[in-house]
Amino acid sequence: MTRTKSYAEAISLLNTCQSNAAAIEAVRKSGGRLQELGIPEMLDYLRRIGYKPDDLNALNVIHVTGTKGKGSTSAFAERIVRSHLPSSSKVGLYTSPHLCAVRERIRINGEPLSEEVFAKYFFEVWERLENDPKTLTPTTPVFPIYFRLLTLLAFHTFLSLGVDATVLEVGIGGTYDSTNIVPKPITTGVSSLGMDHTAILGNTIEEIARNKAGIYKLGVPALSVPQDRAGQVLENYANEIHAPFQVVPIIPETSLGIRGDHQRINASLAVGLAKSFLASPQGGNQTFSEILPESFVKPLAETKWPGRCQRVPRGKVTWLLDGAHTTESLTSCGEWAWSEAKPTALIFNCSGGRASDQLLGSLLQAGASKCGQSKEELGSTLDTVIFCTNVTYTSGAFKGDLTSNAIDPNDLSQLATQHALRDAWLALNPCFPPEQVHVVASIEHAVNIINSQNKAEVLVAGSLHLVGGVMEVAGLQDALGMN
């Protein structure tokens, strides 16, 4: 069959590279370390599309990892750096996951690739892999898994377009992540390492920190936000490999384009990374002595990062969107949501196997503390609670860009996660009317309930995939634009 080389066909081929739920969960629990051949395989894929590792140094990379806030940090850093380079410069940003469209992950000067540009470079990468099918080992697939393929696509796109700087967000972990094949970044940084990830992944904070520190490189500035136990691990590793280590100072309070009190920590790392980059020859040898340079204030205020503490009014409904999905991030979400508004409805989901009572409890406790109420009192201020899957439509279909093989089909057919969430909610709120707690099979079901009841302020949380699906179904795509 003749290829159309359209965006839709690119997404269809890309989706064939998704791993199933079990494989993704295994990698997540290993902190990205499951495949020791991961980096050698990634380097071989790079060779097969026509590049050497040293070619990636031309991207002038700011490399960012962490367990919380690495995406927001990347967005802040990109905006600051772009505002300090000549107007003709191109700044690339590679992040994950996407909300509504895969091409959101690869941006030039804040704008997602167009469908045409995405498809053009996708098929160049795909066909190079097709034309050189010999893999590193007999068990290595001809086409890499989803995230690796997108990373290769980002590298190829940025090199083809001649970017002047690249902000590169790690996917999972650090040492073994597919982004970690750039030999010589300009600067590197680690955002907050959340303690709740240790329980989820079954690793100690020291093990997680050592893995994250794997993005530090010989002679390259190695930055971190203030950490607890993890800080010493990061510093020790940086010293071992002779990377100049710095804990960034927390910037004074200032207006930030991404809402939430916790964003000041992320902005502080972004400021440190931007200073480090701009002080390099690639950044124009620009030096700044202040903790928060005056010229950084405006870009920080102008930074946008969709789906994170985002308020989107639409008709009679105000959507409060936050993809928070850990106990710590849901605490921040609760503080933001109940200071920003008074939610009357909640749409929530989380990945299977997560501690439903802890996640919902963190959200409610934070909101209750903000309002001076108990969790039960705060829960009673909601009159509709909906637990849904991340399936996009009532037909059971996904939008192409939102297709996910990561959902366990057994869990999905029984709505097991959603029923567990319902049980947890009613245990946390024993006086809450059970008939007002809905378990539904798709995001469209959830949005239909909201539209039928004409709710005023709706909080959507627990999953970035859920937030993206709500944005798609509720027609909020215009809120995706960055800057």
Image: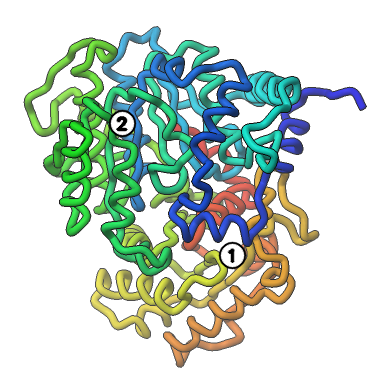
Q: 132 or 126, which is in the foreground? A: 132
Task: Report which quarter residue 434 is drawn in.
Answer: bottom right
Instruction: For label 1, count other residues whose C-alpha is less than 10 Å away and answer few (under 14), some (14-19) or many (20+).
Output: few
Tell me the element at label 1: loop
Say if 305 sits above or below 368 in the image.
Answer: above
Q: Is residue 119 something that shows in the picture?
A: no
Task: Name which residue lies at 33% across and 41% down.
Answer: 214
Where is residue 465? Give x, y as percent.
56, 53
Disc 2 target residue: 77
Disc 1 target residue: 454
Q: Is residue 292 left or right of residue 412?
A: left
Task: Name which residue lies at 12% across and 41% down.
Answer: 249
The amino acid marked with disc number 1 is Asn
Where is residue 425? Give x, y as percent.
48, 81
Say if 78 sits above or below 248 in the image.
Answer: above
Query: Which circle marks residue 414 in the picture?
Result: none
Instruction: For label 2, count other residues whose C-alpha is less than 10 Å away and answer few (under 14), some (14-19) or many (20+).
Output: many
Say if 461 sits above or below 231 in the image.
Answer: below
Q: Spot the residue most to the bottom.
A: 431
- Quarter occupied by the C terminus: top left
Which label's residue is closer to the chain start, 2 or 1? 2
Task: Name which residue lies at 57% across and 40% down.
Answer: 147
Q: Is residue 157 something that shows in the picture?
A: yes
Task: Name which residue lies at 39% across and 7% down.
Answer: 88
